[in-house]
Amino acid sequence: SSSYSDSDVTVIPPSYDPPSSPDLNEKTFSPDPKADGPSESNGDFSDNRYEIIEKLGAGGMGAVYRVHDNKLGREVALKRLLTDLAGSSKGIARFHVEAKAIASLNHHNIVQVHDFGEDDFGYFIVMELVSGKDLDKLIKHEGALSLAKALKMMRGICHGISYAHKRDVIHRDIKPGNILLTEDGTPKIADFGLARVGSVSELSVSNEGMGSYSYTAPE
């Protein structure tokens, strides 16, 4: 099954108390929990173009679904901004940054963006569906990778990062959970929500770092 995660956080002073993770069993993503909205049971949204097949994962910023694109007749991944961030200017800015960053890149080691939009239920990004696990799950399931396998995977990841850097896109949150793997093991970099595009970041704040706690450089 496909594996998508979105567990990145902004690193800020130790006094910060991060919000609790969303309930992965939550079925709907209506802006009002009491309101009728798209779900895995009723299926359709965005003018009925995308039909939900299953939920793939969720994290601090969004939920990701396997959906069927009724217009083009294909399966894709759709990332929906969490409803509690839909009214946050910073949350919306991160979503815009991610869509803009990935859309500017065309590389086989980077997940492709097909569409970005807003409907009655908020903002969403439509992406390439990667059908394998992420690297984090692979390591937890199989343990340490062989040297040959690790080197082959790192070459692909580095090619993708280098390509992005040459186009002034700095990911800033590279970690195993953000590396998706195709069925043949090709790594694809995902989740550009903290990316810097160009010389100025829309998200950086003075005296704050960007990234995930477990993978951010100590300095």
Image (tube, helix red, strand yellow):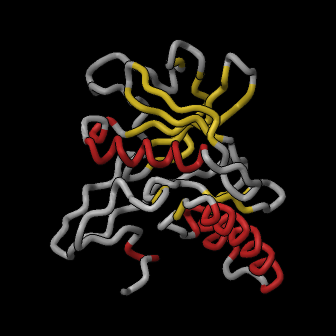
For the point 55% across and 14% down, the residue is: 48
Q: Position of residue 61 (x, y in %)?
A: 39, 48
161 lies left or right of 217: right
Task: Check the picture and name the quadrant holding the C terminus.
Answer: bottom left
Vertical position of residue 173 compared to residue 154: above or below: above
158 lies left or right of 212: right
Q: Nearer the viewer, residue 30 or 109?
A: 109
> Where, by quadrant of the figure, is residue 12 drawn?
bottom left
> Where, by quadrant of the figure, is residue 109 drawn?
bottom right
Numbered circles on residues, count: 0
Q: For the view shown, which residue lies furthest in the left direction?
A: 15
Q: Is residue 134 visible?
A: no
Q: Nearer the viewer, residue 70 or 101?
A: 101
Q: Position of residue 31 (x, y in %)?
A: 31, 27
For the point 61% across and 47% down, the residue is: 104
Q: For the view shown, which residue lies furthest in the front direction?
A: 199
Q: Nearer the viewer, residue 200 or 23?
A: 200
For the point 46% across and 25% down, the residue is: 39
104 lies left or right of 32: right
Q: Nearer the viewer, residue 1 or 104?
A: 104
Q: Position of residue 120 (x, y in %)?
A: 38, 19
Q: Is residue 155 visible?
A: yes
135 lies left or right of 15: right
Vertical position of residue 24 compared to residue 147: above or below: above
Vertical position of residue 88 compared to residue 206: above or below: above
Q: For the view shown, which residue lies furthest in the top direction?
A: 47
For the point 32% across and 35% down, the residue is: 83
